[in-house]
Image (cartoon, grey):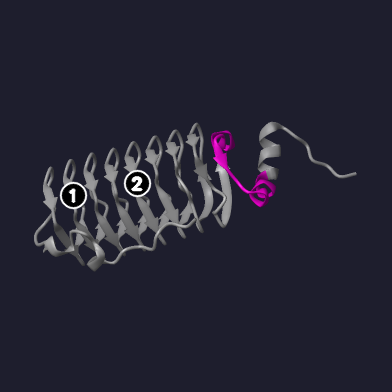
C-alpha cells in the first residue's frame, strides 16, 4: 500500500497560524508557525535551532550549518540543499516534497515518521543515522551512504536506489520491494533484515556471488 498523497500548504493543520519570515536564521533560534517562502540562505549558522509547525516553500540552503537542530512537524516543498550540514539533527513528523539534497551531511541524525516525496538525494551522508518509520516515495537516491545507520520500518515505494551503501547498517522491517531499481555499491551484509523481491534478488546476484566468493562460470 502506497502512502497518502503529499499535502499542499493550505492542507496543513497549522496553515492558518503561519506568519511570513523576514530576516536571517540565527543560531539557537526558535521558529514556530513560520512560513519561509522563497528565501535563500548562504552559509547561515542555524545550529541548535528549533523549527516547529513551520513551512518551507522554494527555499535554498547553500552550505550553512544546522547541526543539532530540531525539525518538528515541518513541511518542505521544492527546497534545495547544497553542501548543507544537518549532522545530529532531529526530525519528527516531517514531509519533504520535490526537494533536492546534494552533498548534504545528515550523519548522526534521527528521523521519525518522516516522508520524502519525489525528492532527489545525491551524495547524501546518512552514516550512523537512526531512521524509524521513514518513507521515500518516488525518490532518487544516488550515492547515498547508510553506513552504520539503523533503519527500522523504512520503505522505498517507487524509488530508485543507485549506488547506495549499507556497510555495517542495521535493518529491521525495511521493505525494498517497491523500489524500481536497487544497486548497492557496498555493504551487502547490511541488507540483512530487509525484504526484497525475486527480481531484485536476481539483480543483486552477481554482487552477492562476488561477496561470498562464488565463481560463476558456464561451460
At a point 58% along the width and 49% down the height, the residue shown is 183
- Is 201 placed left or right of 155 in the picture? right
Decide whether residue 194 is among the magenta residues: yes
N-term-proximal mark, 2 vs 1? 1
Residue corresponding to mark 2? 113
Look at the image and tell me in which quarter the C terminus lies: top right
- Is 7 placed left or right of 167 in the picture? left
- Magenta span of residues: 187-204
Decide whether residue 118 is among the magenta residues: no
At a point 53% along the width and 52% down the height, the residue shown is 162
Q: How far across and down, in percent of the image, does residue 93 sit?
A: 29, 49
Q: Nearer the viewer, mark 2 or mark 1?
A: 2
The CA distance from mark 2 to mark 1 is: 16 Å
Does the CB distance between marks 2 and 1 fall below 8 Å?
Answer: no
Residue corresponding to mark 1? 51
SS under mark 2: loop
Amino acid at each position: 500500500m502506497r502512502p497518502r498523497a503529499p499535502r499542499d500548504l493550505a492542507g496543513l493543520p497549522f496553515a492558518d497560524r503561519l506568519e511570513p519570515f523576514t530576516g536571517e536564521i540565527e543560531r539557537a533560534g526558535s521558529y514556530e508557525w513560520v512560513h519561509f517562502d522563497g528565501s535563500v540562505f548562504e552559509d547561515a549558522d542555524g545550529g541548535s535551532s528549533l523549527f516547529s509547525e513551520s513551512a518551507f516553500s522554494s527555499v535554498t540552503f547553500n552550505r550553512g550549518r544546522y547541526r543539532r537542530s530540531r525539525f518538528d512537524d515541518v513541511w518542505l516543498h521544492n527546497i534545495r540543499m547544497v553542501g548543507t550540514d544537518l549532522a545530529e539533527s532531529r526530525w519528527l513528523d516531517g514531509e519533504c516534497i520535490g526537494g533536492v539534497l546534494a552533498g548534504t551531511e545528515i550523519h548522526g541524525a534521527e528521523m521519525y515518521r518522516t516522508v520524502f516525496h519525489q525528492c532527489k538525494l545525491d551524495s547524501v551522508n546518512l552514516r550512523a543515522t537512526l531512521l524509524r518509520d521513514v518513507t521515500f516515495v518516488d525518490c532518487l537516491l544516488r550515492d547515498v551512504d547508510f553506513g552504520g545507520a539503523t533503519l527500522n520500518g523504512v520503505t522505498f515505494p517507487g524509488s530508485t536506489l543507485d549506488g547506495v551503501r549499507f556497510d555495517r547498517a542495521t535493518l529491521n522491517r525495511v521493505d525494498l520491494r517497491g523500489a524500481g531499481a536497487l544497486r548497492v555499491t557496498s555493504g551487502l551484509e547490511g541488507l540483512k533484515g530487509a525484504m526484497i523481491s525475486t527480481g531484485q534478488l536476481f539483480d543483486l546476484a552477481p554482487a552477492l556471488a562476488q561477496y561470498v566468493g562464488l565463481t560463476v562460470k558456464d561451460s
